[in-house]
Structure formats: C-alpha cells, structure tokens
C-alpha cells in the first residue's frame, strides 16, 4: 500500500480508475474562490490518497468563472506530483491550446448532445463543438510536447436534458462516432443533470463500446436523484473502467442537503473496493483529505455517506481480499 | 392508472414489488409514538399510491417498543384496505400467533445470522430463532383462518454485523435451508447494518435461489453507506423481485443528515420505474403521501433525493414506456 501512497498505482495495478473532478467541477460550482495555494494542497492530499487522475481546473473566461482564473498555475503545480495524470477542462480549441501550453496531460472538452443545452452552455451547436474538438486534436498532433497530450470528450446531456427532456440515443451515438473521426482520444458519457437510470446506462455504454471500441471513455454520473452509485453498477456491467467523482460531492447541491451533484469520491471508492475492485486509493487517506478541503472552505457543505457512517467492521480493501484468496 | 390507485395492482401486473416497511421499521426507530389514527391515515395514503404490501407494525413487548403497542388495531384497520397485503413483524412464535389472530396476511420473523446480534436483538441463538419459526409455521398450519397466512423470514446481518464484522456466507445459506425445512413461506436477506456491497448481494441472492428455489424472498437493504440502490441493481440481476423500503427513509439516521437507514421508497420507485420495471406505484401520489407523514410527525427529518430534486423533465413511468413500445 505504501507505494500507492507516495506514487499512484499504474493503470495495470488497478481494476477501476476513479477520476477526481472536485477541483474543477466542485470548485466551479460554488460561489467562493479557493486560493491557489489551498487548491494545490488539496490536490496533493488527493494524490497522496492514491488518486491517479485529477481534473484540476477549467481553462475558461476568467470573467465567467473567476474561480478558475488560476488554472495554468494549478496545472503546473499538479504536474510536479509524481505519477499524477493532470486533466483540465476547456470548452473550445483556443482554451484547449492554453491548457496544453500549461502542460496538462489530458484536456477534457464537453460536447452537449442537447442543442438547447449546447447553446446555453457553450454558445455553439453540437456540430460546432465537434469542430472545436477537431481543431484541438490538430493542435495536439502539431504540438512539440515531449509527452503526447490527449484530448478527451465527455458527451454531456447524454442521458437527458433539463431543458429538452429526453435526448435521442441514436444522436448521442452519432456524436460519439463524429468525435472519434475528429480525433478524440476518448469519448465518455455524462449525466450532469442526474437523469440517467441503470438500464439506460448499461444499454448506452454497451452501445458506445460497439460503436467506437476502445475509444469508449469515462462515465460522469451525478447523484441528483440518489441513483449515482446504482448507475455505476450498471456501467461496470457494460465494461466502463473509469468513473468521475468529486470529493465530498463538493458544489453539487442545487436543491437541499443530501441532493448532491457529482457522485461522492469516498462513497464510490468504498463501493468499488468492497466489491473487490482495486482502485489504488487508500480510503482512510482519502477521508483525511476531506479535512484539507474543509480547512480551505470553512462552512461549505460537504456530503458523503461513508464519511458519516464510517467503514464497516472488518472492512478489507480489494487488494487484501485478493491476498486472502 | 386509476385502478392502481383505488386497488393495488396484482402481482401479475407488476415486475417488481416494493414492500413498504416505514410504518414498522421507520416508526419503531424513532422516539415519538405516532397516534393510531395517524398511522392508519398514512398507511391509507401509501396504499392509495399503489403500494400493495405494507408492513404495518411489530407485535413485540409494549414495554420494549411502546411505539408499536397498537399493532393489532393498526392491522385490523389496514386489512380493510382493498387489495392490500398486510404484514407485521413478530420476534417469536407467541407474538406471531398474536399477529395472526389480529388478521395479518403475512408475519415477518427476523432470524439473525450473527450469534452476537441474535442474542442482543431477540435474546436467542439463531437455532432457537429457527425453532420459533417452526412453531409459528405449525400454528399457521393449524389455524382455521379462511385465508392462508404466510410466515416470512428475513435473515438479518446476512451481509455483515456491527458486532462481529463479516458473517460466513455458508452459514447464512445453511440457515436459509433450515428455515425452509422449518416451513417458512419465504426467506429473504437483510442488511440492516448497511454492510452489503453489490458483488456480495448478487452472489448471495443467486446462491439463495440455488439453495431454496422459489422460497427465496425479499431484499431488505439499507443505505447507510450510500450503496442501497446500487445493491438493488445487483439484486435485480440475481432475480430478486421484492424490495423493502421506507417512505422518506423514516427513522433511519443514526449518524447525521443524509446517512439514512432503509432505502427511500420514493427513490426506489423512481429507480425501478425509470428502468422500465413496473411497480404499480404512482410516484406522484407516493410523494404526496410524504405530506401525510410530515403532518403526523412535524419536525421529524424526512429523506429522499427525488422528493428534493423532482422528477426529470419528460419522465415516463414503466407502463407508459411499454405503451410507447
């Protein structure tokens, strides 16, 4: 376990990758701005717990999201953490180029399947957003960076949209194919509105893999209607091996206490490890990282069941279950 | 849908049965005692939403659980609701006989797999608890009741115990076989401590069905560590078709807001219906029944994600998904 803590596990040493998005999705959803130094301290604590992928910020208009104005500084600091994959979000090719210039290992670009949501979120049609991905991929291919930088896409509103309601699955799959043709390294499906159900998740991720093979990417699931981890179980069945989550469900409560947004990293890691799936994350150290977050944002509501209830008596992480046979 | 509301759907008309345990498990977990009249009003509201099974009380020592002292009166009132299956809990054969005398359709008897928990909970060994089930079944067989009354068992601490930690799966299965031999009509598995994980739930319910066939019964799952609905997805895969749940997760919060006990009926019904599984429950009327509960227990914390977030735009219950093809 010691090596996991000082150096995140390699992909081959884990069964499921938990991709922490709190420093991006969590921090951009709250009003307050966490100081750069505190962000770096929190990211270091998350990495020390064994998380090997962290989305550390958004490259966006500082006027629109002042909480993310220091993204380049945070990326540079995060890239100094041994073994950590540093991700950042960028809504278009121009910002993707800035993220790459700052040194990110992977840029995440959101492409919304819902036309109304796409307009409202990034002021583009879905087709224009695909074109931005194509340009970002061209930039990636021309870059002289020693290490290849990846362009990943999350298709948002893939399971439904708060403006339009249901979104046709055929269109989501067509978008995935177009994004693959545009050069994206990985294409996942996002449920930022908390509309997905396990039957749909299983069906769509199975279909995604059929359509684009190994380019099928992460599941970004929310817990808005309490179904987040249920959807994880269905996605696992469909072969998904990377899940986004946010420590303490930070920033995800549009309604009331308990109605969180992102699935909670601690609860996800507990679920996976208890199922015998190795995440490389030390859940005790992950729970300790909440304190770093709480110190940096005093009074901010933090969520999570495992943090409240504690681990079951006799709990064994996946690696110990294996050792015991 | 109208017929579901005035008369619960028959078992053939639904895919999954949601068995409401709030009036028993919820009300016996809180300090206050709900007046008999209010209990009946709440049970009527739950039945009007389409729930076809409700566990309405416990036949136990009134000194130990004064909240349940009116169980016989509540059973008699509930039995007047058309089409409703009325269940009550009884810890031993003597109380099971009282429940049958009051007219319940089914008696639920808890048998704990953990020796320590069994002693602490019912002051018996697991073997003595099996013997109580045998005697209750003998009483059932000798009863002159016009309608056959069933004896159901939930094996508690089946997935782990707060005192002992892990509980051997072989022993849980052996208990299930002994209970089948003792004459129980149905034997389910309970996770009152919130220890279960989806891999274990899938494995154990699959094995339960292999061991005792159609006597394999309900899943009683808690959400203590946020994994309640994830375990439901796994149990569905293993062929489970009856799930216990409690409206508003009543009474289930031993730790802090959010760390509920029983899975929340509203969230479970939403999950199942969104997956295309018919429950016979009208989710709108189910959400309305929360008001009856809130009026009867002002100030009592009520939980649930769907109640906070509302239904997704364009949500269609399972029956309408089928109509649309």
Image (cartoon, coloured by chain):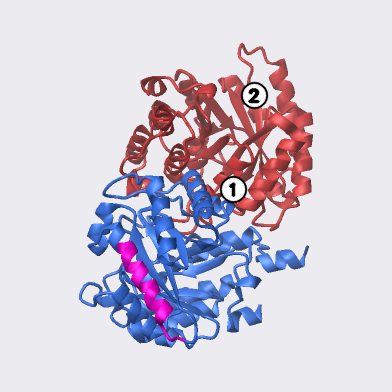
Chain colours: A blue, B red
Position of the C terminus of chain A by quadrant: bottom right
**In terms of secondary structure, what is the magenta stretch mainly?**
helix
Is residue A130 on the magenta stretch? yes
Image spot of residue B55 (x, y percent): 53, 32
| Crowding at mark 1 (Cα within 10 Å: few <14, some 14-19, many 20+) | many
Image spot of residue A305 (x, y percent): 49, 60
**Residue name at image x 66 percent, y 65 percent:** A318
Q: Quadrant of residue A23?
A: bottom left
Mark 1 or mark 2, which is nearer the start of the sequence? 2
The mark found on residue B150 in the picture is 2
**Image height of A20 relative to B296, above or below:** below
**Residue name at image x 48 percent, y 52 percent:** B260
Badge 2 element: strand
In space, the residues marked 2 and 1 are separated at their CA atoms by 22 Å
Q: Chain of mark 2?
A: B
Query: Disc 1 designates what residue?
Result: B192
**Residue name at image x 77 percent, y 65 percent:** A324
Image spot of residue A80 (x, y percent): 48, 88
Q: Let me know if residue B21 appears in the view.
A: yes
The mark found on residue B122 in the picture is none
The magenta region covers A129-145
> Could you say which is closer to the camera, residue A273 or residue A108?
A108
**Residue name at image x 41 percent, y 70 percent:** A22
**Image height of B170 relative to B282, above or below:** below
| Crowding at mark 2 (Cα within 10 Å: few <14, some 14-19, many 20+) | many
């Amino acid at each position: 376990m010691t090596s996991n803590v000082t150096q995140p596990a390699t992909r081959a040493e884990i069964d499921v990758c938990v991709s922490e998005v709190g420093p991006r999705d969590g921090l951009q959803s709250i009003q307050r701005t966490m100081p750069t130094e505190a962000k770096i301290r929190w990211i270091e604590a998350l990495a020390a717990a064994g998380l090997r992928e962290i989305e550390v910020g958004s490259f966006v208009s500082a006027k629109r999201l002042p909480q993310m104005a220091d993204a380049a500084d945070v990326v540079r600091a995060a890239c100094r953490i041994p073994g950590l994959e540093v991700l950042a979000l960028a809504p278009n090719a121009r910002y993707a180029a800035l993220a790459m210039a700052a040194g990110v290992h992977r840029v995440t670009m959101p492409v919304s399947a819902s036309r109304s949501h796409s307009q409202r979120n990034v002021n583009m049609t879905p087709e224009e957003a695909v074109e931005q991905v194509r340009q970002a991929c061209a930039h990636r291919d021309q870059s002289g960076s020693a290490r290849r930088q990846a362009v990943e896409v999350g298709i948002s509103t893939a399971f439904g949209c708060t403006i339009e309601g249901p979104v046709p699955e055929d269109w989501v799959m067509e978008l995935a194919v177009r994004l693959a043709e545009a050069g994206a390294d990985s294409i996942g499906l996002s449920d930022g509105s908390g509309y997905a159900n396990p039957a749909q998740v299983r069906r769509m991720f199975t279909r995604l893999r059929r359509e684009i093979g190994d380019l099928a990417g992460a599941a970004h699931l929310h817990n808005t209607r309490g179904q987040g981890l249920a959807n994880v179980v269905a996605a696992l069945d469909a072969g998904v091996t990377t899940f986004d989550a946010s420590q303490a469900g930070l920033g995800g409560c549009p309604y009331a206490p308990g109605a969180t947004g992102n699935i909670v990293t601690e609860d996800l890691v507990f679920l996976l490890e208890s199922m015998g799936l190795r995440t490389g994350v030390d859940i005790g150290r992950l729970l300790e990282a909440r304190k770093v977050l709480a110190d940096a944002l005093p009074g901010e509501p933090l969520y999570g069941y495992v943090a409240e209830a504690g681990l079951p008596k006799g709990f064994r992480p996946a690696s110990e279950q294996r050792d015991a046979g």
